[in-house]
Image (tube, helix red, strand yellow):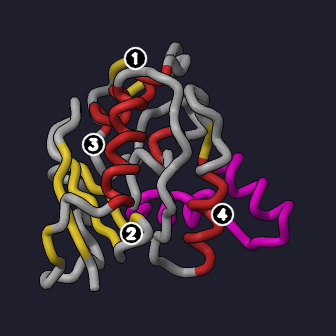
Amino acid sequence: MTYRTTLVSPLGPLSLASDGEHILGLWLEGQKYFAAGLEETAEERADLPVFRQAEDWLEAYFAKRDLPPLPPLAPEGSEFRKKVWKRLLEIPFGETTTYGALAKILKAAGVPASPQAVGGAVGHNPISILIPCHRVVGTDGSLTGYAGGVEKKRFLLELEGADLSGMYIPEKGTAL
């Protein structure tokens, strides 16, 4: 059985999915691949402990308080995507990395990867914010590739205090 709920956030409504024990998905309203894999028969259950744990984490995150432990996560995807998503969890709060740097780390661990393949996996991350795909930027410093939208990516990075000097938004051709 799959369960769902919606939480209010500074970025707008967040839709969450769970198997009852793990978070399976967290999507921003209007996000590319919104609710990908979520069963239409998912039951609305805001009272699940895992949803309350996710809500506590998100409230602390948006309030810039010390973060409690992440709720249990179980993103569904290929083995390669799961390896990329695991690496995303290792990017420190307030820091960024590039698709190319992630590809190099994966290659060093024996996982064949290209920056493009990493970008595909990052773009299909089903658990936004909790698995911090917003911390990955283009090699040239561009804020690109965020399924929730570049402005939301910028908001999250600014919230975390990431150094955005020298970064730009390619669609607008503007420096930050």
The residue wearing badge 1 is: 175
Q: Is residue 27 left or right of residue 109?
A: left
The residue wearing badge 3 is: 149
Look at label 3 and name its amino acid: Gly
Magenta-colored stretch includes residue 72: no
Mark 2: which secondary structure?
strand
The residue wearing badge 2 is: 24
Residue 82: quarter of image: bottom right
Look at label 1 and name its amino acid: Ala
The residue segment tinted magenta is: 100-126
Name the residue at 69% across, 67% down.
113
Name the residue at 43% across, 61% down.
125
Mark with earlier residue (1, 3): 3
Look at label 4 and name its amino acid: Ser
**Mark 3 vs mark 4: in front:** 3
Residue 151, image x, y percentages:
28, 31
Mark with earlier residue (1, 4): 4
The residue wearing badge 4 is: 114
Task: Give the numbered dot on residue 21.
Answer: none
Q: Are marks 3 and 2 in contact (CB under 8 Å)?
A: no
Mark with earlier residue (2, 1): 2
**Mark 3 vs mark 2: in front:** 2
